[in-house]
Each structure stands twice: as C-alpha cells, then as structure tokens.
Amino acid sequence: MEQATSNVVVQPADPAKIRGIWKVALILAVVTAIEYVFAFTMAKGMLLNVIFVSLTIVKAGFIVSEFMHLGHEVRSLMFTILLPMIFIIWLIVALVNIEGSAIKDGRGTQDAMEPAKTEHHEDGGH
C-alpha cells in the first residue's frame, strides 16, 4: 500500500501573533481582576451591578473584536452589528425592570433597601 505524501509546510511561529495573543489575554485578565476588586470592596447595590454589566460588555466587545475579527473590519460593518446589540441589551434591561416592578407591585412587596414605612400612633400617654 502506498503512503500518500502531504504538501503541508510547517511555518515558524510568528512572534507578532504570539505577542498579540498574550496582549489579549492580559487585557481580559486585567478587566477580570478589576471586577474582582469591585466585588470584594464595594457594597452590594445598583452601582455595583452597573459596573459589572459595563465591564462584562467591555470584555464581550473585546472578545468579539479580537477573536471574531470584527475589529479588523470596516467601521460600517462594525456598527451594523454592534448598534442593534446595544439596543437589544437596552430593551432586555427595560423589560426586566418593567416586569420585575409589575411582579413586585402585584405581590405587594417592598425593596429590601427601602426602610419599612411604619405609622407612629400616639395613644395619648396610655
């Protein structure tokens, strides 16, 4: 039986591409480290949630830009893909907020952060 020969030529490693991969890994690691710092140093609340969502969007955009090669395309194609995604994210946040408020109002519950409203009655000194 004959053995098929291959025309595969091994290319030497490109140092520029390797540096690029390490750069991407370093940027993602730094953004993740920033998320951890915020998670353990800030009080839980809306600001922390906004920071987490913002940093997650930054990481997702960077991943799409580098690994899906969207950052190397023409600007019009980038905006054609990214702008609708921004509006979809806004729509999801708005709908979750509206639906969550409706469910909370329907159950008659209050936010944990708001102090409970208590009525103060004076009983005339009795």
Image (cartoon, rainbow, N blue to C red):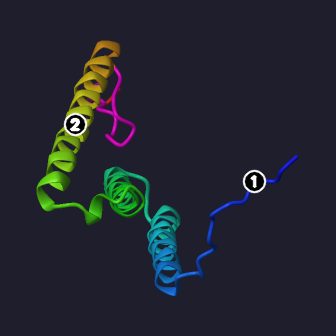
Report the residue marked by disc 2. 88
Give percent across and percent down for residue 118: 31, 30
Above or below, comparing residue 119 to residue 77 in the picture: above
Q: Is residue 95 magenta?
A: no
Closest to the observer: 104 or 23? 23
Give percent across and percent down for residue 82: 21, 49
Sequence order check, earlier mark of 1 and 2: 1
Distance from the alpha carbon under mark 1 to that under mark 2: 52 Å
The amino acid type, in three-letter code, at marker 2 is: Ile
Q: Is residue 96 left or right of residue 68?
A: left
Magenta stretch: give its range.
109-123
The amino acid type, in three-letter code, at marker 1 is: Ala
Above or below, comparing residue 28 to residue 6 in the picture: below
Say which residue appears at 46% left-offset and 84% top-offset.
16
Position of the C terminus by quadrant: top left
Q: Is residue 124 visible?
A: no
Give percent across and percent down for residue 75: 14, 61
Q: Pointer 2: residues within 10 angstroms few (<14), some, or many (20+)?
A: few
The local secondary structure at tag 2 comes to helix
Say which residue appears at 26% left-offset and 33% top-offset.
92
Question: Residue placed farthest to the top in the image?
Answer: 106
Report the residue marked by disc 1. 4
